[in-house]
Amino acid sequence: MKKLFLMLIFLLVFAGCSNNEQKDVVDQNVDSYVDSFIETMVMDYVVFEENEYVVNFYVMGALKKLEDFDKSRIDLDENELGIYLNSLEKTPLNLFKIVISNDFFGLDQTNVINELNLIEAESITSVYDMLNIIYALNVLEIENELKNTFEEYVLDLENNSYSDSDYASQVIIALANKDYDLTSHRNLIIESLSTEGINSWGNNNSASTAIAAMAFLALNENPRDINGIDLISILFDYKLDNAFKWLKEDSEADLSFSTPQAFSAFLLYQEFKKLDERINVFS
């Protein structure tokens, strides 16, 4: 009986060690992928050439968290970029694009702040335009009546005709730094959660899984243990070479959404582990 008891103790200890080692392997894979992406792919997601500027907001927001990121890796003329940004049509999406780019490169925000101050709440009817304005004001650390109006509107899931886990994640990222009750938004993500990741647009997919991971990080929750499910580990099931597929069965990588969002989720998770506090990609 004593031998049996000792054997059970050994097995429990061994299982615990194996679990910790597995967790360490996932973290090591995260570190490796973040380093590889920055070394070989980051230039594809912040591009300014021939008077065209392409930027992935999630990548830029995540990179801003790295104090030691060398911006010289991104080959562009910051003065020319500033002129270009100021010339853009002042749509909500472009205003966010200008704000996050100015913030990243240390450019003056005066003109875009003036443009944001001109917006009348009645002129914005799309919840996604409202989210872009909220994101912009979050980056600028500005609180005003317009922002509060839009926050209250997007908070109500019934104000969006198609509220799914993706939308809930975006709202959480927009509002998590304030004292709103985001339980219904979190529950909407949980309803889409499985061992295959997050189901949105009719399928479990890596893009939705990544943005959900970012939402949980904004809520100060470890995405490696959401109701016992490890979203970070699951993302690697979608990996193809140095990129990520949208669906597991896809034969090609999704470089537009899944890959940059997976990278951003990994980098934010990395920083979350270091700082042991909530981290938000857009604030």
Image (spheres, rainbow, N blue to C red):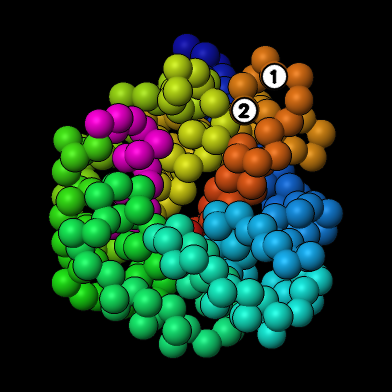
**What amino acid is labelled 1 in the image?**
Asp
Q: Is residue 194 above or below residue 146?
A: above
Which mark, residue 246?
2
The answer to whether any part of residue 161 appears in the image is yes
> Going 55% across and 48% down the picture, which residue do you hit?
265
**Marks 2 and 1, Cα distance to the nearest angstrom?**
7 Å
Instruction: Specify the segment rendered in magenta.
Output: 161-175
Left/right placement of residue 266 relative to residue 9 reads right
Q: Where does residue 67 sit, x and y in percent of width and height?
A: 62, 76
Magenta: main secondary structure = helix
Q: Is residue 165 above or below residue 196?
A: below
Mark 2 residue element: loop
Q: Where does residue 241 sit, x and y in percent of width and height?
A: 81, 34
Is there a contact, CB below 8 Å, between mark 2 and mark 1? yes
**What amino acid is labelled 2 in the image?**
Trp
Residue 140: quadrant of the picture: bottom left
Q: Is residue 8 above or below residue 140?
A: above
Position of the C terminus, as image quadrant, is: bottom left
Q: Nearer the viewer, residue 129 or 194?
A: 129
**Residue annotated with mark 1:** 250
| Residue 168 in magenta stretch | yes
Q: How many marks?
A: 2
Left/right placement of residue 18 relative to residue 74 reads left
Mark 1 residue element: loop
